[in-house]
Structures are given as C-alpha cells and as structure tokens.
C-alpha cells in the first residue's frame, strides 16, 4: 500500500516536472533559463560571440581564402576596438573569430566543422568553396549550427526548406552567367562563343545561366564546349581545341586561380585573342589578369557587387579608404587586396553586424530570424544599385550583379559589349 502510494507520488512529480519543462520550451524548441529568458546557445556570452571560418589558407586557392579571413577580421577588429557591437538584447559584445584551414578539401572542411563544434563556436560562415561548404552542410543542419554568408553561388544554401540553417552571400552562379549572356546578346552583332567550365555544380551553374540568357538570340552561336576537373593541373588541351573553333568570345567558368592565369597565357601563345568572361571570384586585376597578360585581349569582362580598391574611381571613396585602413590594421593584410573576397567578407561582417543588432535573445534561433530579416541594406563597399536582401527564399544575401570591363588597372561598369 505504501509502495503504491509512493509510486503515485513519484509519477505525479514526474508529470509536474514534464509540464514545467514543456512550459519552459519556446515555439522553436529554445530552452529557457530559470529567469524566463532564453538560455544562451554555445559560443555566446554577455560580452562576446565566437564565429568560426573554415576556408582554404593553403593550396591553390589560398589567396582567396586568406582574403575571406582578412576582410572579416578587418571589419570586426575595428568594431571591437571601438567597444564592440550592441546586440538586440541590450548587451554589447565583441566578436571573436576562429579560423581553420581546409585547403579546399571537403574532408578537411568537415573535420574543421566538427572541431568548431568542439571548440564551441556560435556560428560558422564566410568561408569560400562549394564542395567544402557542402561537405558539412548536413551536419550543420542536424546540429542546428548556423552556416551563413558562405561564399558559394550554389543556390542550395539559400533554399530555406532544404537548408534551414544556411544562407549564401554571393550571387548564384546562374545569376552571373545570365548577366554576361544578356550583355553579349544585346550587342546586336554576331558572336561565336566558346565555353570552358568546371565539371561540377559551379561550372554547370554558370553555363546554365549564360545559355538561358542567350536563348533565342540569333546573333549568338556557341561553337565549342569543353570541361575540366577542379583537380586538373593543366587545361592547355581544352584551350587549343576551343581556339580552333574560331570563337571571338570565351566564356571561362573557372574557379582555380593558377588555371585561369595559365589559360590567359596559353591562348596568347597560340594566337587566340577573344573577349573573355571570367567569374567574379577569379577575375582579380593584380593576382590573375596582370600575370596572365590580360592587356593583350580586346576585352576582359566579369561581374561585381563590390567596389574595387584598385580602380582609380574609388581611390578616394570613403568606404574604400576606411576598408583599406581596417584591412591593414586588423586584418593583417597590408597590401592592396589581390582578390575580391577581401571586400566580400568585409561586407559579410557588416551584414552579420545588422543581424546582431536585431537579435533579441542570445540564441542561434534568434540570430537566424534576425539574419533573414535584412532588406535593402547598402553595406559598406557595395556598388550603387546593389544591396543586401536576405528576405527572399531561394536567393542569397546578394543577388544582383553589374557586368564590368577591365580597364588595365581595375574595372568599370560595362553598359554595352565591345
């Protein structure tokens, strides 16, 4: 009898505890502290928040990867020096950044993410690479760790249903390819186009966007197509075959810096000098075009959403002057940026700043809600006519680009092709 009564008492206590536990759970499953406020997620305290970045700091893509870290550290270093960022919950915090080298190796990036979780980062983001970011995307979802403002044009990362804890930063590959295709098609003159693309989602996205844009354009003919693997050490054979097509426009959807330089040099060696299109991430004036001898071609085109510090028109621009100062002082990058990723990660930092200011609770849930609520934000370094908008499902934070033409030093917006 006493045992039965004791059991009832125990079950009753368990039931009460269960009800209490449920009452302390938010609508998205956020735990609550005894005071009734949301319990902080890992990686955030009343005075700091920790971000993790896995990106290539060694290997063929170390140049762009180093820039991703430098730009982020430049932005947040300046903010920290000024006292920190006031978050939406009223607390002022400094941003700490932990960096991890993945050498553009998917297995390494997955290992880095697992290490980040052990290290207690609040969120991961900003690092570049489609295969490397894809490698731990599912793990980030299952562990509910934000993987945000990643530098890949893969639209998967901006699909909220498939990627609830992700968000891309840069325009989708299709958007870049489409922008160039429209410019060429609108020229009104006949052009023969040769295509060389990376044999993965990166290259396929660029080509798909370009072909969609020229569909129905009677003045554009694709006369040759080749692919290459990201692990290839040479594309000389592909360049030689495409040169034989007689194309006067070369659409080169390539992400590997040394191969882009080698392509520019090889085409000159065999006397093929078409107008070129290069993706935004492999079109650096100093790191790629200068050593590649780009001045030999009638036109080098790319797309952009950020100001290029190398361009004379931005030499005295307020944003650019501040950026270069921050990059040198806090990003440990004293030279003129060799890659646009330095500017992109600075823009990413400013975008995260906006989200932090609207976080009402120190949780990952609150952060994702705030991050997805940014609209028409003209971040520092953004070109006029572009802005950050994270409110459109299926689109990255930045979706609009402007086609630009190389002018020997930097780029200027191209209003026509030729």
Image: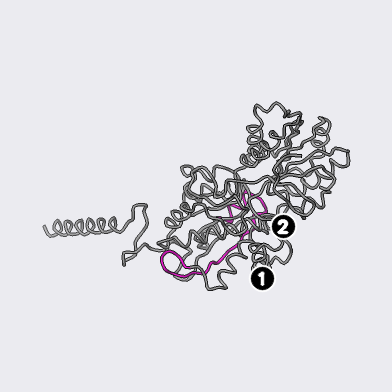
**Chain-order first, disc 1 or disc 2:** 2
Q: Is residue 263 left or right of residue 352?
A: right
Q: Is residue 57 left or right of residue 266?
A: left
**Residue identified by numbered label 2:** 313
Judging depth in this view, the residue of 224 and 104 nearest the camera is 224
**Residue identified by numbered label 1:** 329
Mark 1 falls on what kind of element? helix
Whether residue 11 is in magenta: the answer is: no
Q: Residue at x 61, y 41 (%)?
A: 175
On the image, the x and y values in percent for residue 26 come to 33, 55
On the image, the x and y values in percent for residue 266 come to 84, 42
Q: Residue at x 45, y 65 (%)?
A: 87
Q: Residues within 10 Å of mark 2 (few under 14, many from 20)?
A: few
On the image, the x and y values in percent for residue 296 come to 85, 45
Q: How is the image coloured?
A: one colour
Q: Is residue 342 left or right of residue 395?
A: right
Res 16 quadrant in image: bottom left
Judging depth in this view, the residue of 114 and 303 nearest the camera is 303
For residue 64, above or below residue 279: below
Q: Nearer the viewer, mark 1 or mark 2?
A: 2
On the image, the x and y values in percent for residue 68 come to 64, 58
Q: Which residues are magenta?
A: 86-113
Q: Which label is found at residue 224?
A: none
For residue 196, above or below residue 221: below
Mark 2 falls on what kind of element? helix
Furthest toward the left, the residue is 1
Question: How many numbered marks have been drawn onto this rendered protein structure?
Answer: 2
Proximity of marks 1 and 2: CB atoms separated by less than 8 Å: no
Image quadrant occupied by the C terminus: top right
């Amino acid at each position: 009898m006493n045992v039965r009564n004791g059991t009832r008492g125990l079950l009753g206590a368990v039931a009460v505890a269960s009800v209490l536990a449920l009452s302390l759970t938010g609508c998205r499953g956020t735990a609550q502290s005894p005071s009734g406020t949301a319990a902080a997620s890992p990686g955030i305290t009343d005075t700091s928040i920790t971000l993790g970045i896995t990106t290539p700091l060694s290997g063929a893509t170390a140049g762009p990867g180093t820039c991703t870290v430098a730009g982020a550290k430049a932005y947040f270093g300046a903010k920290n020096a000024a006292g920190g960022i006031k978050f939406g919950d009223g607390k002022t915090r400094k941003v700490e950044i932990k960096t991890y080298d993945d050498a553009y190796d998917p297995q390494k990036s997955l290992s880095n993410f697992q290490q980040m979780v052990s290290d207690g980062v609040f969120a991961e983001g900003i690092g570049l690479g489609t295969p490397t970011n894809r490698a731990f995307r599912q793990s980030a979802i299952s562990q509910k760790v934000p993987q945000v403002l990643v530098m890949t044009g893969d639209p998967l990362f901006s699909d909220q249903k498939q990627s609830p804890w992700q968000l891309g930063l840069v325009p989708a590959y299709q958007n870049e390819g489409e922008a160039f295709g429209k410019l060429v098609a609108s020229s009104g003159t006949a052009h023969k186009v040769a295509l060389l693309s990376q044999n993965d989602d990166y290259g396929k996205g660029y080509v798909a966007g370009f072909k969609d844009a020229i569909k129905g354009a009677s003045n554009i003919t694709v006369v040759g197509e080749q692919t290459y693997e990201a692990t290839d050490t040479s594309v000389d054979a592909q360049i030689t075959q495409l040169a034989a097509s007689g194309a006067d426009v070369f659409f080169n959807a390539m992400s590997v810096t040394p191969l882009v330089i080698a392509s520019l040099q090889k085409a000159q060696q065999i006397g093929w000098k078409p107008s070129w299109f290069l993706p935004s991430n492999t079109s650096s004036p100093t790191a790629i075009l200068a050593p590649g001898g780009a001045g030999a071609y009638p036109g080098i085109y790319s797309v952009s959403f950020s100001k290029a510090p190398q361009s004379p028109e931005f030499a005295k621009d307020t944003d650019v002057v501040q950026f270069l100062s921050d990059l040198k002082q806090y990003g440990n990058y004293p030279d003129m940026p060799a890659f646009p990723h330095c500017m992109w990660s600075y823009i990413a930092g400013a975008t995260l700043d906006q989200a932090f200011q609207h976080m009402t609770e120190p949780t990952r849930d609150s952060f994702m809600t705030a991050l997805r609520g940014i609209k028409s934000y003209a971040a520092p370094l953004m070109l006029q006519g572009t802005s950050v908008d994270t409110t459109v499902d299926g689109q990255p934070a930045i979706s609009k680009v402007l086609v630009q033409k190389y002018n020997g030093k930097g780029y200027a917006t191209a209003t026509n092709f030729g």
